[in-house]
Image: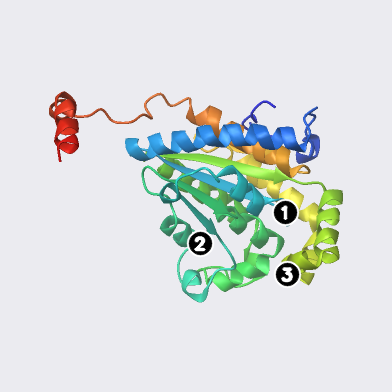
Amino acid sequence: MNPLQKVSPTIQLKDYPTTVETTADKKELEKSLKDVRKQLGKLQDRLYAHGKYSVLICLQGMDTAGKDSLIREVFKDFNARGVVVHSFKVPTDIELKHDYLWRHYLALPARGKFGVFNRTHYENVLVTRVHPEYILGEHLPHINSLEDIDEAFWAQRFDQINNFEQHLAQNGTLIFKFFLHLSKDEQKNRLLRRLNKKEKNWKFSAGDLKERKLWDRYQECYQDAINNTSKPHAPWYIVPADSKPAARLLVAQTLLESLQGYPDIKEPELDLETKSNIELYKQQLQNE
């Protein structure tokens, strides 16, 4: 399969498929992923040694879209010291005492490392837009009622997010944003699987069904967020997510191809003195 293409505004989500056409079966897709993630693992080592870029990977999608398993499978061959995963839940009391981007700044990857945001700062223009009453809990000045949360408020948030990501990019963070595009029918199947398999019951929440009833509203908000924030320095990619193996491979291929486009990411050269004395150092060790 070919890597994903960057989203160029303006898009209609309904025009994007949730399945990908491929003749490969599950085993073939998993084998291809294994090959790609090994290459990604080696590239991550170079990125770590190079020490000038960080990589931020943002994953968004409806419940059951496959974010957790994608993280597990795509980054399996990474050195543990080179990748950090953050799963953002409902903001804590301490987090609510700061602006909504504060906790995301704290979780950003250091130079040389990959950071994966499982749900991201975009929750602040998605969940809160579907449920604007949550905004009142942020105790913002001039926001005293739901009537104060108008379209201008959301436009301002998009500007803030774009400025946040531009600042990161200008300082060496390579940003990839993936929307796992799941069909409503496939979500139903995955929720039923959680109910039918005892070992999966713990993943189910009655709240999933409440949010499912708001499916169309979520799709509208995702579309609006993508259209307003897909930029050359921080692009969105729409991932057909009805097949988990295919989605994982597409994300891995996209990361690999994009990062290979940075020829300066390579191991640093040894200083001349160390380089000229390598044989001497070998002899010293062998003669111990």
Sort mark 1 into few (<14), some (14-19) or many (20+) by Cα contacts within 10 Å.
Answer: many
- Amino acid type, callout 2: Tyr
Q: Residue furthest bottom?
A: 93
**Sequence-wise first label, 1 or 2:** 1
- Count every numbered label the image shows and give the total: 3
Quadrant of the image for the N terminus?
A: top right
The residue labelled by disc 3 is 202
Instruction: Please tell me which residue lies in front, 178 or 146.
Output: 178
Residue 111 at x, y = what percent? 36, 44
**Sequence-wise first label, 3 or 2:** 2
Residue 193 falls left or right of residue 123: right
Residue 91 at x, y = what percent? 55, 68
Image height check: is 185 above or below 148?
Answer: above
The mark closer to the camera, 3 or 2, is: 3
The residue labelled by disc 1 is 62
Residue 145 at x, y = what percent? 63, 72
- Amino acid type, callout 1: Met
- Amino acid type, callout 3: Trp
- Local SS, label 2: loop
Q: Give the Cα separation between the discs numbered 1 and 2.
A: 21 Å
Q: Is residue 7 visible?
A: no
The residue labelled by disc 2 is 100
Q: Give the Cα separation between the discs numbered 3 and 1.
A: 18 Å
